[in-house]
Image: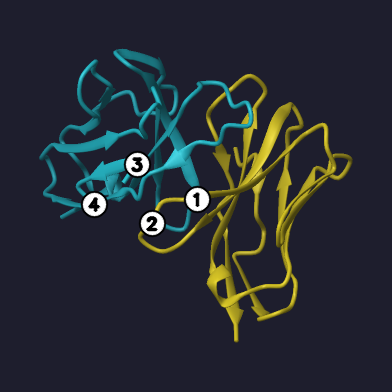
Chain colours: A yellow, B cyan
């Protein structure tokens, strides 16, 4: 039961442009949605999160948008940099819970 | 290094052998989680432990898999009589609290288990 879906396995963006990574979810009874970034042979690194009571959260070049009616989450990276090239995982954590539920990831390539 | 430490980074076992994966949480963290990532998949929750207690093992296979987090020492994920399907990356995460309250889980770099 894939409760978090990342339908784009890969994305290529030019340096300086905006990267938009998307995530859909099938259950809305959750407190937090998170984005993790993962480089090869390393563990996921927390990037940014958003509570289900908010629509937007911003941290430097990274902004996460939550559209609860569409059950859709997106991560915007602007401007994109070559060092942003990694796999990005969307995840959610249940209300009063702890087990992260991850999507399959989107591989982002930022070209110079 | 104050991060989550996992060892070994790579582990090769033959079918039928035992695999032991170790995880030392971040300093000050008493909650440990194990996740497994199969090829081309996202991470899947396996088990959640606190010191000397298994809180939730609902994501862990009922047979051959076990986990512990003793009072002293690292958390151990043990896989007995390994099979080819156990080949995966196993990640450990830790957090200061069990309930997510704006305290993200911090992950180690994983153990890549290969079964010959």
The mark tally for this picture is 4
Q: Secondary structure at mark 2?
A: loop
Which residue in the protein does label 3 denote? B2
Which of discs 3 and 1 lies nearer the camera? The answer is 3
Mark 2 and mark 1 in contact? Answer it, CB < 8 Å: yes
Residues tagged by mark 3 and mark 1 found on one chain of the structure: no
In the image, taking residue B97 as reference, residue A29 lies left or right, namely right
Q: Residues within 10 Å of mark 3 (few under 14, many from 20)?
A: few
The disc placed on residue A45 is 1
Give the foreground label among 3 and 2: 3
Q: Nearer the viewer, residue B84 or A112?
A: A112
Residue A89 percent location from the top left of the image: 57, 52
Looking at the rendered image, the quarter that the C terminus of chain A falls into is bottom right
Q: CA distance from mark 3 to mark 2?
A: 16 Å
**Label 3 element class:** loop
Mark 3 to mark 4 CA distance (whole Å): 17 Å
Which residue position holds label 2? A42
B36 left or right of A104 in image: left
Residue found at x 59% / y 27%: B100
Say which chain tag 2 marks.
Answer: A
Q: State the image quarter where residue A37 is shown.
A: bottom right
SS class of the residue under badge 4? loop
Front-lying residue, A106 or B24: B24
Residues marked 3 and 1 touching at CB (< 8 Å):
no
Calculate the distance from the C-alpha at mark 4 to the C-alpha at mark 2: 10 Å
Let me know if marks 3 and 2 both belong to one chain: no
Q: Mark 4 highlights which residue?
A: B9
Q: Find residue B68 and report its image quarter.
A: top left
**x, y (%) of residue A73?**
76, 49
Q: Quadrant of the N terminus of chain A?
A: top right
């Amino acid at each position: 039961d894939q409760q978090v879906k990342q339908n784009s396995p890969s994305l290529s963006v030019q340096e300086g442009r905006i990267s938009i990574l998307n995530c859909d979810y099938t259950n809305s009874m959750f407190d937090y949605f998170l984005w993790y970034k993962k480089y090869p042979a390393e563990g996921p690194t927390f990037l940014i999160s958003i509570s289900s009571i908010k629509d937007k959260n911003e941290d430097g070049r990274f902004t996460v948008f939550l559209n609860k009616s569409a059950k859709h989450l997106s991560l915007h990276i602007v401007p994109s940099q070559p060092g942003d090239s990694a796999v990005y995982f969307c995840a959610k954590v249940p209300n009063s819970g702890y087990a992260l539920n991850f999507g399959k990831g989107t591989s982002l390539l930022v070209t110079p | 290094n104050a991060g989550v430490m996992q060892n070994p980074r790579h582990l090769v076992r033959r079918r039928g052998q035992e695999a032991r994966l170790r995880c030392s949480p971040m300093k000050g963290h008493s909650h440990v989680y194990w996740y497994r990532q199969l090829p081309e998949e996202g991470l899947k929750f396996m088990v959640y432990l606190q010191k000397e207690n298994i809180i939730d093992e609902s994501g862990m296979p009922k047979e051959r898999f076990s986990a512990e987090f003793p009072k002293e020492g690292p958390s151990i994920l043990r896989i007995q009589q390994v099979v080819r399907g156990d080949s995966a990356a196993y990640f450990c995460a830790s957090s200061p609290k069990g309930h997510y309250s704006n305290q993200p889980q911090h992950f180690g770099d994983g153990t890549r288990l290969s079964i010959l």
